[in-house]
Image (cartoon, rainbow, N blue to C red):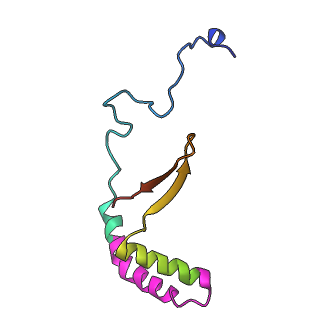
Amino acid sequence: MTAESSGNTERKVRGRPFKKGQSGNPNGRPKIDPEVKEALRAATPKAVQKLIQLIDSNMDKIALKACCEVLDRVIGKPEVVSKLEVTDNTPKTIIVKWQD
């Protein structure tokens, strides 16, 4: 289909669908219902206890996942370091950090 037959001659720009200064989510993240939040807070000790029990699992995959979950929450997730080659064949290091 050509631009003439579709009647739309303007191309969409990827990665920037909104005008400068315009937010794609003007109201922000939706608020969690206070009752739901309280129910989850009440279940937290039980969830933590289960996670600690799973560390001693006989299945290595389960024990490893439980260990990772505990460590991620206590000391934070590790930095991710990747090497990338660009067109001039010079190796570059990119560090991506997630913030809480």
| Marker count (numbered) | 0
Q: Residue furthest right?
A: 1
Q: Quadrant of the C terminus?
A: bottom left
8 displayed left or right of 73: right
Q: Quadrant of the N terminus?
A: top right
Q: Is residue 48 magenta?
A: yes
Residue 8 image offset from top left, x and y in percent: 56, 14
At a point 42% along the width and 80% down the height, the residue shown is 47
Q: Is residue 88 above or below residue 29?
A: above
Q: Is residue 16 magenta?
A: no
Point out the stretch of residues depicted in magenta.
Answer: 39-61
Residue 11 image offset from top left, x and y in percent: 54, 20
At a point 62% along the width and 13% down the height, the residue shown is 3
Residue 6 image offset from top left, x and y in percent: 63, 13
At a point 33% along the width and 31% down the height, the residue shown is 22
Q: Is residue 30 above or below residue 18?
A: below
Image quadrant where residue 62 sits: bottom right
Residue 71 image offset from top left, x and y in percent: 42, 77
Q: Residue furthest top?
A: 4
At a point 54% along the width and 51% down the height, the residue shown is 84
Q: Could you tell me what secondary structure mostly forms the magenta stretch?
A: helix
Image quadrant where residue 32 sits: bottom left
